[in-house]
Structure formats: C-alpha cells, structure tokens
Amino acid sequence: MLATIVGLAAFGFLCFVGVAIFIGATVNSSKGPKQTTANSVLELKLNDPLNERGREGRFGGLGGGGSTGLVELKEAIYRAKGDDDIKGILLNLGIVQGGMASLEEVRNALLDFKKSGKFVVAYHEIASEKSFYLSSMANEIYLNPQGTLEFNGLSTEVMFYKRLFEKAGIEPYIFRVGSFKSAVEPFFRENFSDSARYQTVSFLNSINGYMIGEVAKTRGIAPARLKVISDSMLVHNAPDALRLKLVTKIGYFDEVQDYMRGKLGVAKDKKPSLVSLSDYVDNGDAEARVSSSTSNRIAVIYAEGDIVTGKGSDDNIGSTKFAEAIRKARLDEKVKAVVLRINSPGGSSLASDIIYREVLLTKKVKPIIASMSDVAASGGYYIAMACDTIVAHPNTITGSIGVFGVLPNIQPLLADKLGITVDRVTTGKFSDLPTITRPLTDFEKRTLQEEVNRIYADFTSKAALGRHMPLERLRRLASGRVWSGLEAKNNGLVDVLGDYQDALNIAAARAHLKADDYYVQRLPRQKSALEGFISMFSDDDAAKTRAIKTELGPLYPAYAQYQQLMQMRGVQARLPYSLDIQ
C-alpha cells in the first residue's frame, strides 16, 4: 500500500511538472519572436501542412501535429525584408504540403522579398512538384547529387467506393442537379463520368499552365520548352535538372552553407547564423496589426474547412459561429470593412445559406470582400457570391454551383451481413421519412429530388443576383462545374485575380482608409495553445479520430468516405470528390 501511494504521488508530481513545463512554454511562445542576431538567414523548412491560420502541435508543438499559418509565414517574410539583421532566406524544402493558391501567395511574398536586394537560396534533397515551384524563384537552387526533382505535371486521383458499398450491403440513393455535380459519383460509380473527367482535365490544365508560365519567368526558360520537359518527363535526377536549367547547382548542404558564408562575409570556419521560422514569427498580436495609432479596423474572417450546421469545430466552418463572427463585424462601428477569407470545398446548403444571409446584410452597411484561397467551391462559392468583390487566385478551385443529397439504405447490411431485421410503427404513410433502414418508394424519391431541385434554383438565382448576370447565362456556368480561378474570371464568376493582400487593399479603398489608418482584426478567435492542450483530453471526438487514423493508416480515407456518407444530413453544396492535386 505504501509503495502504491508513493508511486501515485510520484506520477502526480511528474504530471504536474509536465503541465507546468507546457504552460511555461506556452507563455514564452506567446511573447513574440526571439531576438535575432545580426547577419542572419531566415530558414524556411515548411514541413508542416500549410493552412490559413497556424496551429501549434500537440503539447505546444513538442509532439508534432501542428500546421504552418499562411498569414504568419507571409508576415515573417515581409518583416525579414525590412529587417537589417536578416540578409537572406534559405528554403530548405522537402515535400511541401499546401494548395496551389497558398503556395502562390508564399512565392509572391518571396519575390517581393528579393526586391530588397537580399538573396534567396533553395536546397532540395528530394524536390516535389510543389516544392520546386516554390523554390523556382530563388537566386540559387541546389539539388543534392543523389536527389531527384519532380517536374512532370499535375494530377489528382479519386477513390470510388461502389464495390465496397455493394460488398457491405449499403445502397446509396442519389439526388442531384447538374451534369457536372459529380461529388456523389464515388458512391455509385467505379470511375470518372465523362463530364467529371472533362471538367477536371480543364481546370487541372489551367492550373498547370499557369504554374509553367510562372516558372518560365523566373528560370528564364520558354514556356513551350518547359511544357515539353514536363510532358515528356525529361528530368529524373540531379544531372538532368542541372542540364535542363531547372536548378543552378548540384551540391550538398555544406556547399549551401559555403554559399551563405560568401553572401554573409563569414569565415569558412564559422557556421552561418540560421533563424528558424518558429523563432522568428511573431506569435503575439503583431501579425494582425497594420497601425496602432487608429481605432479603425478591417475584420478578416477566416472560413476554412467543410461548412456544417451549428457551432462546428476548429477544423470546419460552423454556421452558428461564422454567422456570429460576421454579425459582430457588421455591428462593430470600429470595423470599417470586412474580408471573408475562404478555403472551403463547401458542405451543408442550409449552413451555407445562413452564412450567406449575414454576408448580404453586411454588404448593405459596409464593404465586404471575398478572398478565395486554394478552394472556394460549391458552398464555399455560396458564401462568397453576395460580397461586393470576389478576389481569386488564377489557380483557385472554385465554382461547382450545384447541390446534391444522399440517403443510404443499409437494410441489406443489417439483414444479409449482420442478421438484423427492422420493423416499425408509424402514424402516417411517410412518418419514418427520411430513413436509412428500408428502400425508398418512387414517390419518396421524386419528393426528395424536387427538394434538391428547389434548393438548386434558389442557389443559382442568388448567384445570378450577386454576379449581376442573367439567370440563364449563370446556369450555363453552373450545373456543378468546377473552374480554376482564371477560368472563373474569364466567365464572370469572380471579379479580380489576386491574393489576400489585394483583397485587403480593395477593402481599405472601399472604406476610404489609407494604408496606415487601420489594423486587422482576425475572426473567429482561435483557441490558445493552453486551451488546445486541455481540449486534447476533453474532446472525445478528436481523440477517437486520432486513434482511428493511427490504427487504419492508409485505409483511413476509405473509412472517412464511409463516415461522410453516413453523416450527410440535408442537401449538400459540396465540391466533387476530395481533390488533392499533386
């Protein structure tokens, strides 16, 4: 008994010390960047996923699982441009995890950094297509002698679950509008439909063409030549990359250090001073501050993830939370304009409409500008279409104006696989509708399809109104079709090709604010590191998801697709598939 008591006391003491260390690290990390020594280089590794707003990993970043915030990263690059202690930037890149539009914003920030006359050097051991695109603007690009460089075009692949559902005994009933509304195809097909393949080829080639054009500018290679290199996959290894002028040097990391020593004027026996992004980034309020001498604000509302009804979570766009954030910005007299930053494939049509209403009300009293990131499609487009101006990247994925509904029938699963039968008592002929434990009648199918048709008509009518476009023309652009930002601009679905800063500038101009006469208020409020630490133990759903991901490994996407099917409630305005461009 004494040994048990002593053991429990020791365990409790260790837990207390661990939590105290975590809290201390959290407090220290919130005080802002560390002091930078003179004659330093900012090192950007970008190993974590690139999201709109950064998030510390488990245990304040000590246990991984975090993400790099696009805003924080760009702020660090901008600050380094004017920091006399920072002489250059090192891109020490592997497999960069981010969408094409996000990478474009980072790349543009690096190009702006170079205008200061400071250097950017890149080092790759393995250069993926995205990491090479990011580094293609560097003054010097080093590739390890045994390294490889991927430059063979973009692709996306989709898993189809028809056979899985057939084996499991799940019969999905599909209700949709639009020949291009292919979000539900994985549930009842084994491959792309002709229309889905057509639209995917179109926007993927648009994004790839834009990327090749930008690489051509910075590498000094004709776009036609780069297209041949890409399509024929002429580059495999480091000698290929050097011969084709995709990189400037073949070398090891110590040779990159020699290059930096030369730029810094440091002796060969001295190690170049490298500053990590985590040490340099301002974790306080500086990233949201443009001017501290005014009370004028521009509210930037970050909408990232699936659109869901209710409060939602940190990883999605809950209609209640985001409607409240927009309403707060509208009613705050200090907020002179709003930027709605969207990175979403869509989701619930009901939730999208709730947020749309708040956008519409805000538009009547102050400027509200949509800034599209990697994806702003279907429900993501829905919440943007009432804004005064829609700003998108050329390689944003947008459009997908259409809706669908899915109702699974799991009766075969219950009866044939599990031996479970279901009986029911009702007060009317349709009292149990919607149900997932019996087949639908033809009348019920028609009724549900009519509801989907009604919501699609409402979606397209509101889109036509927001775009000041005849309804028939809008519907020719709708039908669930996905467009790149460049295609959407040419078709009148967006107003301006640009990035977040362009949207902020437009908002300031519409509110008649000078560049030094406002500061940015970021909404909704994020959890602090300590709140995130506590939620790890109080959020059962998050803990369950982490456990399932660990257990299933590469099979988790199939499980997630099944879960998505079972959890879809009401009509959905969602992007086709889960697009991951590589």
Image (cartoon, helix red, strand yellow):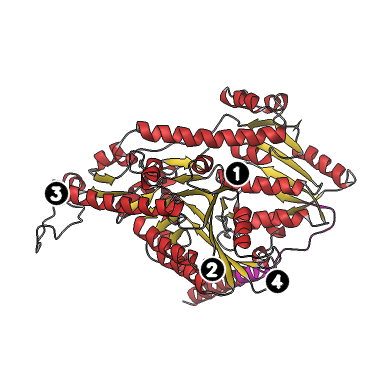
- Report the Cα–Cα distance between label 4 and label 1: 35 Å
Tell me if label 4 and label 1 are in contact, CB under 8 Å: no
Quadrant of the rendered image containing residue 282 = bottom right
Identity, as a three-letter code, of the amino acid under mark 2:
Arg
Which class describes the residues within 10 Å of circle 4: few (<14), some (14-19), or many (20+)? few
Q: Which numbered tag is attached to residue 96?
A: 1
The kind of secondary structure element at disc 1 is: loop
Which circle marks residue 292 in the picture? Answer: 4
Q: How far apart are marks 1 and 3 (CA)?
A: 50 Å
Q: Mark 3 points at which residue?
A: 443
Residue 497 vs residue 57, the one in the foreground: 497
Q: In this view, does 512 lie above or below 3?
A: above
SS type, badge 3: helix
Cβ atoms at labels 2 and 4 below 8 Å apart = no
Amino acid tagged 1: Val
Does any portion of residue 150 appear in the rendered image?
Answer: yes
